[in-house]
Every structure is written in C-alpha cells, then in structure tokens.
Amino acid sequence: MNPAMDPDLTVARQRSSLLLLRLLLLVALLWSGLALGTFSLGSSPHRVLHDLLSEQQLLEVEDLSLALLQGGRMGPLSLPPYLPDLDPDCRELLLDFANSSAELTGCLVRGARPVRLCQTCYPLFQQVANKMDNISRAVGNSSESLSCARSLLMADRVQIVVILSEFFNSTWQKANCANCLTNKSEELSNNTLYFLSLFNHTLTCFENNLQGSTHSHLQLRNYSEVCKNCGEAYKALSNLYSEMQKMNELENKAESGTHLCIDVEDAMNITRKLWSRTFNCSVLCSDTVPVIAVSVFILFLPVVFYLSSFLHSEQKKRKLILPKRLKSSASFANVQENSN
C-alpha cells in the first residue's frame, strides 16, 4: 500500500495541522496581550500562561505541545500500520527470552568475583535454554511457528537472539559448570555441596582466629593461631579437592585438559593463597615421611658399603698364612731332631 494513500496516515496529518493551527492562535493571543500591556515582558512564560488560561486550559496546551512533538498523534508512540510486525505469540516468546537473558546476564556479572557462576546462575541458564528451545522449535510444524523462528533467528545479518544464546552456551562450557551439577543439571552435585561446605567452614575458621590477634600496624602480624587451629580444616579441604580432580580425570580420560567447575577451582585458589601467602602456613603432607625415610636410606648406603668393606678387609689381614718354603724347612728340622 502506498503510504500517501493510507487513510490513517491522512487523518493523522489532518489532526497535526489542526493542532498546529490552534497553537498558532494561542501564540497570537499571547502576543496581543503583550501589545496591549496586559502582561509585562519581565514575566516568565509559565506565569503568563497561568494568568491568561485556567488550569484545565493550561493542561490542554501542554497536551497539544506533546502531541505536536509526537507527530500529531495523541497517546504512546506505535509502529506505522504498513510496517511488518510479529504476531502476538511470537512477540511473547521474544519478550520471554529478553527477560530471561537480562536476569542471567545480571547473575553472571554479580557472580564474577569471587566466582559464583555455576552455583547461583544454573536455574537462570536452564530457563534461558528453555526459552531458546521454544523459539527454535516449530511446534506442530505450523507455518506460524516456522515464520516466527525464521523472523527471530534468521531475518537479519546480526541475529541478536542467536548471538546471545551462543554467548551464554560458550560461557557455561568455559566455566565447566556441568561438572558441578547432576547429570540433568537440575541441582548441585553432592561433591560440590560438600566441598562448598568445607570451604565455608575453613573461611570461618580463618576469620574466627584472626579476630583474636590484635597487633599494631607497625608490627608483623602473627598468624600462628590460624595455622595451628585451622590446619585440619584446610587439610580436609585440600584432600577433597585432590580426590575430585582424580575422579574428574578418570571420568574424562578421552578429553585432555579437563577442569573442575570454575566455582570449585576459584574457591580452592583463594584458600591456598590465604594459607600460604597471607598466613605463611604449611602442612606436612602424608607422603613426606616415606620420602624422607627413603632419602636418608639412600644417603647412608655408601657409608654402609665402605664401612662393611673396611671391616671385611681387616679380618683378612689378621689371618696369617705360612709360605710353602717355611713349611718344608720346619719339617726337615723336625726330622733331624728325631734322628739325633
């Protein structure tokens, strides 16, 4: 349809012209009041209008001005009727995806530091995935649903809906959030819940033992209480993290370089930095004692070898062996003595 021949557009233009004419008449009336001296030039424009018009007429003038700024239409702006638009069901799907995407984006940003992406945002991620499935899935293979999916996913070069969906999926995969969840990604796994519980317990132990140490800012703080009282909690957390790593490697033998979910890794990194760098604590590992014992044994092996060699050689020196000549001469002397 030709826009110039649209009856709705023609009526809108006529109303705009009428409103403009009424505003011009009002300006002429104000000018005549100024010329007759009814109003002074020092008066403010709003004061002049208030003196000339009643409250109801003043509100009508403001509505007329807003209507002219809106192109002659009263009420909210809307798309021209000759432009293509989405059907109500398709627009509702788009709005649902927009609201879910906004909620998920806010959750991801709020959980950036310290990292709390997987444990706080997994319900919103599932919600966005479901909304995307509703858009892309052609229910009943109807022409309306196919048209809606085509309009929202393939109608333009940018494809905003597709880009947002791919961004959320790639972020979720990089964070390895599936490693923290159950198989159906409906809730956190038992290992993750247990790890987070130990992590919170360890941080609480740190905080409680730090409150008792009061030192001046000029002196080095003594964290011996933290190291002594929180060693068992830190050791339990570290052992659980190692076990989770081993289990993850066994479950993903075909995939190289697999990681735990980012929430667990970041929590362990924070704890290790506090323990080793801030508090300068250390824990004797269970494998240290056997390693030290084997090292000492290997170190003393040369000493034992040379000592045994020395003792064995000394014993050989003590055994005197007579030469054969000495034996023959001694026997000949005995024979002579017997003959005499």
Image: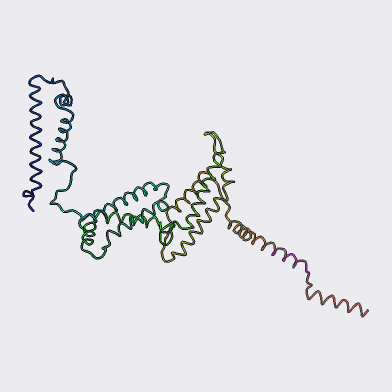
Looking at the rendered structure, the number of numbered marks drawn on it comes to: 0
Asked whether 55 or 148 is in front, the reply is 55
Looking at the image, which residue is at 69% across and 61% down?
307
Residue 312 in magenta stretch: yes
- Is 168 left or right of 55, judged from the image as shown? right
Q: In the picture, which quadrant includes the C terminus?
A: bottom right
Horizontal side, residue 40 vs residue 191: left or right: left
Extreme residue in the bottom direction: 339
- Name the image quarter holding residue 304: bottom right
Please tell me which residue lies in front, 290 or 200.
Answer: 200
88 vs 211, left or right, is left
Q: Look at the image and say whether residue 192 sits in the magenta stretch.
A: no
Where 316 sits versus 175, above or below?
A: below
- Residue at 35%, 47% in the rendered image: 106
Q: Which residues are magenta?
A: 308-320
Q: Position of residue 274 (x, y in %)?
A: 50, 46
Q: Residue furthest left?
A: 5
Q: As rendered, which of 307 and 336 lies closer to the eye?
A: 307
Residue 192's spot in the image, x, y percent?
47, 56
